Amino acid sequence: MLVCAQKGGFAEIFASLSFLRTEAFCFMKGNATVVPVGEDQLPMLEQCREIVHRFNAVYGDTLTEPQAILVNNSVCQRLREKRVRTYCVGGLIDGIDNAMRGKYAEDFIRGMHFDQAFFSCSGLSRDGLLTGHNESAISFLQTLLPHTEQRIFLRTHNKLNHAFMHVLCSLREVSEVICDEPLPEELQSMIGNALTPRQPDAST
């Protein structure tokens, strides 16, 4: 089956007998904006987006480029096979590091409490501020840390004395730092100063 789109008396052949392109046409026919897919279907959806992009380049903003919502993930599946309880926060996948972030992820985090969080960011300034250049990543961590008992900052020596636009927190709000070399003494002394000590369980 060949599918033709008509506009202003002109015809553009944009699909062929290919199974993938036939599925892509189904998305376009339904004007789908968000499509739930598995990881194995992402290439097909990407091909659909490319068809829409090329079509719109010729005929104007006519068709909608569908966005993907992943309904499975190979990493989560492997963890489940090892009997590791795994939660997916949802949200938009950040193209920089493939992490899920945004409003949906942050709303999920607000309903949880975590014993430990291992996290990182782009820089640690001379005055002990943890900073980053990715606004969505910093926003997600700003939501996560208040819901976390033990906040463990992972850093490498090349992050020291670097400051970026978005401030996450101070070393005073961090429980522990794991690094490939010792922190300067003035920064080491700041760790955890602003944290409230955990009260002992009354039942023990």
Image: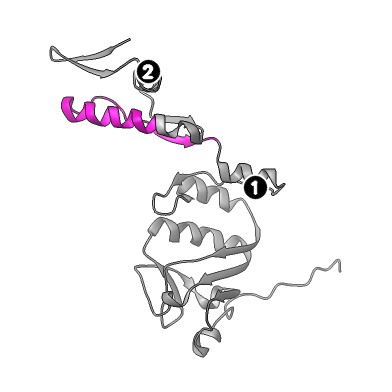
Q: Label 2's element?
A: helix
In the image, the segment drawn in magenta is 45-71
Q: Position of residue 82 (x, y in %)?
A: 70, 47
Q: Position of residue 152 (x, y in %)?
A: 59, 69
Residue 102 in sight from this viewpoint: yes
In the drawing, does residue 15 fall left or right of residue 57? right
Would you call the spot at circle 1 few (<14 residues within 10 Å), some (14-19), or many (20 or more)?
few
Q: Is residue 53 magenta?
A: yes
Question: Which of the 4 quarters of the picture holds residue 172?
Answer: bottom right
Nearer to me, 27 or 194: 27
Q: From this viewpoint, which residue is outermost toward the top?
A: 1
Nearer to me, 201 or 18: 18
In percent of the image, x 48 and y 74: which residue is there?
156
In percent of the image, x 36 and y 19: which residue is there?
18
Would you call the spot at circle 2 few (<14 residues within 10 Å), some (14-19), or many (20 or more)?
some
Which residue bears the numbered disc 1? 79
In percent of the image, x 51 and y 33: which residue is there?
38
| Cα distance between the residues tagged 2 and 1 | 34 Å
In the drawing, does residue 178 fall left or right of residue 102? right
Nearer to me, 179 or 108: 179
In the drawing, does residue 128 fall left or right of residue 73? left
The amino acid type, in three-letter code, at marker 1 is: Leu
Q: From this viewpoint, which residue is outermost toward the left?
A: 9
Q: From this viewpoint, which residue is outermost toward the right?
A: 204
In percent of the image, x 53 and y 70: which residue is there?
154
Q: Position of residue 145 (x, y in %)?
A: 56, 63
Which residue bears the numbered disc 2? 22
Say whether disc 2 or disc 1 marks the residue closer to the N-terminus. 2
For the N terminus, the image quarter is top left
The amino acid type, in three-letter code, at marker 2 is: Thr
